[in-house]
Every structure is written in C-alpha cells, then in structure tokens.
Amino acid sequence: MSTSSRLQSLDSWYSEGWKGLNVAVLGLGATGFSVADTLVELGSAVTVYSSDAPSDNVDLLDVIGARVVQTPLDTVPAALQEQAPDVVIVSPGLPPHNATVEWSVRNSTVWGDIELAWRVRDKVVRGPVAAPWITITGTNGKTTTTQLTTAMYEAGGLRAVACGNIGVPVLDVVRDPDGYDVLVVELSSHQLHYMATSGDGAVVPLASACLNIADDHLEWHGSAAAYRAAKAKVYERTVMACVYNTADDVTRDMVQDADVVEGCRAVGFTPGCPRRGTSASSRTSCATAPSTRTVGTARSSCRPSPTSRSPGSPART
C-alpha cells in the first residue's frame, strides 16, 4: 500500500494503518505531548522535534517509547530529513513560514492535532455514533462562549467537555475512558490554519460559530487575508447550524462562502439585548442541493438572510 493510500485509510482509532506509521511531531508543549502520546498508544513510530521541550515531557516520552530530538526548528533538522516521515504533525504554535514547517509541506503530509483527533474520535463511543463536535472561534469571546455552551449541554443532562484551545487538548478528551456525549471545541486561528477542509481528516461539526473578526496574529499568518481565511474554515462541512454575528459583515461573508452539509442553517445573533416577544435569532436555510443529504458529500453554500430591517422593527439577537 502506498503512503498516500495508507494515510487515507486512517479514519478510525481502530484502523490497522496506525501501527508502524512513521510520524514526526513538531513541538512538545501540551498539544505536542498529547499528539505523541496518542500516536504511541496507536502503535506508530514517533519522533518529536522541539527546541524548548519541558524536561518532564521529555522524560515521559522516553518512558512510553517515543524518541525526542531537541533541536532548533528555525532550520530543518538533519534528523528529520533522514527520518523521511510518512506524516508530520505540527503543533499550533509553529507558524506556516517556519523553515521546518515549510520543508514538511514540501516533502511530507502535514496534519494538525485537530485532524488527528477527528480521525480517532471513535475510540470511546457512548451512543450509536461518536460524540458530535461544536466548533467555536473568533478574535474575542471564544473561551467564554465555549464555557457557556458546555454549561448549557451539561444543564441538559449530557456529558459535555470544553476542549481545544481552551487548554484541554482534544486528543486527551477523545481518549477519556468514559467518553462524552458532545465536545465543545474552541479553535484558534493557528489550529484552523492546519485543519483540512476535505477528505476523512476534515472535521464535520454539528454546529459552528465565528463570533467576530479583528486583525490579530498577523505576524503568524502573514496577512489579514490569511488570518480571515483560517477563521473561515470553522464553518466548512457544518451539519446543522453556522452561527454568525449580524453586526460583523466578515462573519456573514464567511458563512455565505462556506461549503456545508445540505440542510444546514445560518443563524445570526447581535450584540444587543433581546426584546420581549422577539425571536432569539435570525435564521435561514442554506441553499439546498437536489441530492440526498449525506455528511461530507452532499453540500451546499450557506446563505444568511439580509440584515436590513424596516425602521422600528425589533433587533435580532
């Protein structure tokens, strides 16, 4: 089996192709460690490259059987070139213009931790299918919104967890022995940059949200356009609802341009307070395709409703 075919087959925790897979992990913070730990558990051959690896993490990886190469990453490590990995998993702290990341893109397949987590999300399943994901991003407010969303699910009696950029790696969550009913995943622009938007590694969220957009992390992304393009990935392949800010035209445009599952709805909110007796949100159906709805295949563009309203009409929230 070719390396490409092998990687394509890795769509489950229980795929045989994980065993012996030659993997390089760039970075050894909390995310990098969770990646290495997961891959060792899957039976892959793992080498971690880091310029400032915490000693505790190095010691733990040595115990579980991963190789660690402590080396600067602003130049391509000779050991990485000699390794010739099947796949390189990049920690979100490393920007795309980093020399080692650029070499990896040219010479291997590059994933982020979110793609790996999506591929192995079925390790522990509490219901008939793996727990759905709610994905949340935005320049400001994403952590608070992630916590609030998780609290609402918990109040409804579900076992939910806030994870991702909020501090708990998604890979730690998908390996929890008790499993979860729903994952509320906060995504940074760095994580979104490395996320796939097609193929088995592309996340298919139940619902997604970008709360707002303001220029941020421009040195990391290289431009405001690249930053916004990364944020827009949160809406791709959404199943039920794309939540956007009606006061932020950029988020509206992101929803309109997103490739989503047929039947997905655009749900708008405003920063204002709701008025008694008014609808809680602005909703509209996405443009539907003629084919039968199938997650990841039959998709359409999401079309938000116009924001204009007649004078004196209630604000939407």
Image (spheres, grey):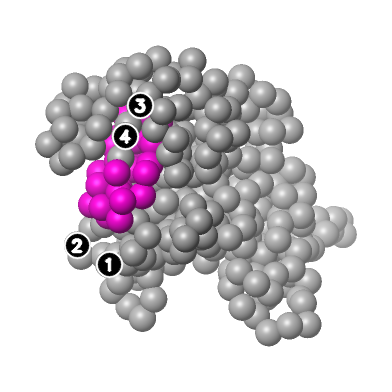
Task: Indicate the amino acid at tag 2.
Answer: Pro
197 relative position to 17: left or right: right
Q: Is residue 101 left or right of residue 271?
A: left
User: CB atoms at circles 4 and 3 under 8 Å apart?
Assistant: yes
Q: Which residue is mark 1?
A: 124
Give the residue pinned by disc 4. 47
**Amino acid type, callout 1:** Val
**Percent of width and height locating residue 186:** 45, 46
Tell me if residue 233 comes above or below residue 95 in the rendering: below
**Residues at marks 1 and 2 touching, judged by CB atoms closer than 8 Å:** yes
**Residue for point 52% across, 32% down:** 104
Magenta run includes residue 226: no
- Give the answer, above or below, for where 275 lies relative to 217: below
Left or right: residue 116 versus residue 95 is left
Distance of label 1 from label 4 (alpha carbons)? 26 Å
Instruction: Tell me if residue 32 is in the magenta stretch.
Output: yes
Give the mark nearer the N terminus: 4 vs 2: 4
Going by the numbered disc 4, the residue's amino acid type is Thr
